[in-house]
Structures are given as structure tokens and as C-alpha cells.
């Protein structure tokens, strides 16, 4: 299967996400870098290049996520899947407090870990966006 994502499909993904990263919720207009299209289930794991498997994603989240679809948390025997923008509601999994993303679920905890969503720079940026009324 081709790695190419047609421009019309890219536009649909971006519009559906309201030009906001579907993982960290940052608006593309608040970024200096163009956002990317993420295969939620990576092609490596059999994910297809179809609208239902694509998410709009900032470069930081996309780079950190890579082809990951899950991680192991505290209990080494339990594999926890990452947040899936087509299946999960962001607000049911996350809470925001002073720029910090708090996990309401194991899925959110796993995603915060893998995507490094609570990196100090991201927290500070989130605080500024909250104060400007631009987040979440």
C-alpha cells in the first residue's frame, strides 16, 4: 500500500479535527510547524490509509507516537492501548489542571507516557494557551 495520502483525504482529516491535534488538543494555528496525518493504527500493524484510521496530529505527538499502539504501565503484565481519536472521547479520558494533563483512565495514562504530553515545555505552553482561552 502506498504511503501517499491524497490531498482531499488530508483536508477531510484536518477539517474533522477542527485543525487541532487529536492527541494534545493544540490548534495548528498556534504552531509554527504544519500538522501531520497520523495512522492511528500504524501501517506496520496493518492499519489502512482510510479516513477512519487517520488523525490530525502535531509533529511532536506524531514523532513521539511513531508506530506505537500500546504500552506497558506499572504492571508489566498489562498492555494498555493508546488513545484512539475515532473510538475515544478526549474529555472522558483527560482532565486539565494548571497546564498538566491528568489521566482519568489507563488509556490516557498510557498516552501521556508515550506521547510525553506532560513534558515541562508542553505544560508551560498549555498554561499560556489556557490563559489566552485557546485550550482545550
Image (cartoon, rainbow, N blue to C red):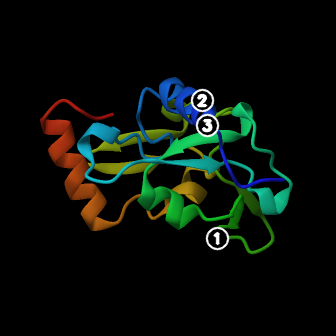
Horizontally, is 82 left or right of 131 in the view? Answer: right
Image coordinates for residue 17, horizontal then vertical, percent: 49, 29
The answer to whether residue 132 shows anywhere in this view is yes
Contact, mark 3 vs mark 1 (Cβ under 8 Å): no
Find disc 1 in the rendering and name its residue.
74
Dot placed on the residue nearer the N-terminal end, 3 or 2: 2
Dot placed on the residue nearer the N-terminal end, 1 or 2: 2
Find disc 3 in the rendering and name its residue.
85
The 10 Å Cα crowd at callout 2, few under 14, some 14 to 19, many 20 or more, is few
Rendered position, 71 above or below 4: below
Q: Nearer the viewer, mark 3 or mark 2?
A: 2
The residue nearer to you, when weighing 32 against 129, is: 32
In which quadrant of the rendered image does the C terminus lie? Answer: top left
Instruction: Say which residue appears at 47% left-offset and 40% top-offset.
Output: 94
Contact, mark 3 vs mark 2 (Cβ under 8 Å): no
Instruction: Say which residue appears at 70% left-offset and 32% top-offset.
Output: 51
Q: For marks 1 and 2, give the CA distance.
A: 42 Å
Image coordinates for residue 126, horizontal then vertical, percent: 25, 48
The 10 Å Cα crowd at callout 1, few under 14, some 14 to 19, many 20 or more, is few
Query: Residue lying farthest bottom?
Result: 76
Dot placed on the residue nearer the N-terminal end, 3 or 1: 1
The residue nearer to you, when weighing 5 against 124, is: 5
Element marked by disc 3? loop
Q: For marks 3 and 2, give the CA distance.
A: 20 Å
Instruction: Say which residue appears at 13% left-offset and 37% top-offset.
Output: 131
Element marked by disc 1? loop
The answer to whether residue 113 shows anywhere in this view is no
Horizontally, is 87 left or right of 114 in the view? Answer: right
Find disc 2 in the rendering and name its residue.
8
Image coordinates for residue 119, horizontal then vertical, percent: 34, 66
Amino acid at each position: 500500500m502506498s504511503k501517499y495520502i491524497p490531498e482531499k483525504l488530508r483536508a477531510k482529516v484536518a477539517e474533522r479535527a477542527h485543525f487541532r491535534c487529536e492527541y494534545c488538543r493544540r490548534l495548528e494555528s498556534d504552531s509554527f510547524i504544519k500538522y501531520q496525518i497520523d495512522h492511528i493504527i500504524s501501517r506496520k500493524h496493518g492499519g489502512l490509509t482510510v479516513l477512519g484510521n487517520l488523525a490530525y496530529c502535531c509533529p511532536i505527538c506524531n514523532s513521539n507516537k511513531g508506530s506505537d499502539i500500546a504500552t506497558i504501565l506499572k504492571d508489566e503484565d498489562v498492555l494498555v492501548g493508546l488513545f484512539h481519536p475515532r473510538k475515544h472521547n478526549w474529555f472522558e479520558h483527560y482532565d486539565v489542571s494548571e497546564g498538566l494533563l491528568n489521566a482519568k483512565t489507563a488509556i490516557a495514562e498510557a498516552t501521556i507516557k508515550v506521547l510525553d504530553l506532560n513534558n515541562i515545555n508542553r505544560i508551560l505552553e498549555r498554561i499560556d494557551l489556557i490563559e489566552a482561552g485557546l485550550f482545550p
